[in-house]
Amino acid sequence: MSFKSLGLSDALIKAVEEKGYTTPSPIQQKAIPHILEGKDILASAQTGTGKTAGFTLPVLQYLTATKHPKYRPLRVLILTPTRELAAQVHENVREYSKYVDIRSTVVFGGVKAASQIKTLRQGVDILVATPGRLLDLHDQKAVSFKRVDVLILDEADRMLDMGFARDLNKIISFMPTKRQNLMFSATFSNDIKKLASGILHNPVEVETAPQNSTAKKVSHKVYNVDKNQKTPLIIKLIKDNNWEQVLVFTRTKHGANKLTEKLIKSGISAAAIHGNKSQGARTKALKNFKDNSIKILVATDIAARGLDIPLLPHVINFELPNVPEDYVHRIGRTGRAGAEGEAISLVCSEETEYQKEIEKILNEKLKTSVLEGFEPTDTAPPKRAATQSKGSFGKKKKGGSSDSANQNKPKRKPHFKGNKPAGATSGRGRTGAPKKKRY
């Protein structure tokens, strides 16, 4: 199958081919025809499989075919959970739209709003945004949702995990009920299905990989090690193997800072990225990591989704996530688009339960070994809280402060009631997000 056979225009195909793609990925093959037909979509796809192009390309085709010659109201809204993902999605939108007359922009917090407001008031067709900043701009009357034809929720499950349900509900209440809705999520959890039932109308379900699966070309390895020996071990692994580009995950912001300082003191170039860093610092750290100015990027789970680093060879879990699904998202940063990758986890005695939960959702045992000179002696019991989190929204995650792009917003436990769509049909699909709905 080719992009041409999917019904895409020559201008879009030219832009896609310039990025090096000639054959649609499975998620693109399955989603694009339905989106072009105006159907609502509930899609789940393994990270790194091209889902951004899967919704961007057909939306661009729709906009170019129906664009008003004079007016340019906001017609497509793409919501993402994190700033990094928003920036990445917008970059893709710009690349795919280079040969069509479509304007787009991105808005998120952490930077001054003045320039964002100026751009919005000049008129854009597509807006990529994080929910918090978007609501702030709407309150300032800098953006209107009255003409939105297509709503896209990217990484919807992560938005629920981060407590954005109420913000999503408020944004949707300002939109016309007649619109097309596309929801992309890593999982089809019960919470996602509840959210979908209040937004999507007769959606086509698209799934291209088993839930919670990782790329086939990613090798998994676990080193058992005492907690206080993790830093010396990771320094040894990086230096002995001469690794040039490694993404390292910690559970907390303090842990990310502390590890980064120790790596730098040992002569390894490194930077940290997490929610307490300014947006400028986060952008600079990511840029330096991508262009190999630094070898190691230490991140909290703010970076588990949305970071597209071509051919990233190594991901290290300095600490296992206490929500097993997050392991899949962390590891999804390597082995993207069919490339090979290596995922290494440093596991102390307190984290053995986390490892078992990860193995359960992966349905495979992780290869576990001990490195000479780092034989573990600690026998501390697993540090698993009595109430275990499964990553659902409204359930508090235990065992460390996970990061989020919504730092100043409390996580609320939303509820669903009567959220079945009540919208009317239209040529571009329908919604049913009743304005008074709360979830």
Image: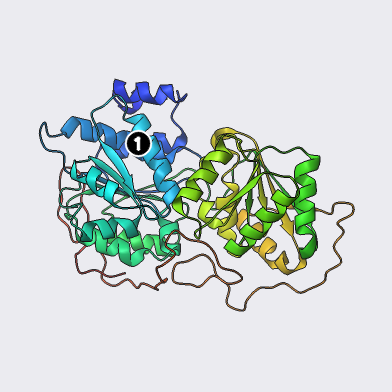
Q: Is residue 159 left or right of residue 296?
A: left
Q: How is the image coloured?
A: rainbow
- Number of numbered tags placed on the structure image: 1
Residue at screen point 61% across, 64% down: 254
In which quadrant will I find the N terminus?
top left
- In the displayed structure, 316 sits above or below 348; it is above
Percent x, y for residue 114? 27, 50
Viewer-nearest residue: 205 or 275: 275
Of 99 and 23, the residue lying toward us: 99
Residue 207 lies, with reference to residue 262, above or below; the image says above
How many residues crowd mark 1 within 10 Å: few (<14), some (14–19), many (20+)?
Answer: many
Element under label 1?
Answer: helix
Residue 60 visible to an observer of this rendering: yes
Figure quadrant of residue 18: top left
Could you tell whether 367 is left or right of 26 in the image?
A: right
Which residue appears at 32% of the width and 69% of the height?
439
According to the image, label 1 marks what residue? 93
Horizontal side, residue 82 vs residue 372: left or right = left
Q: Residue at x 32, y 57 (%)?
A: 133
Residue shown at 79% from the left, 54% from the top: 232
Say which amino acid is labelled 1. Answer: Val
Residue at the left extreme? 70
> With respect to residue 179, does 256 lie above or below?
below
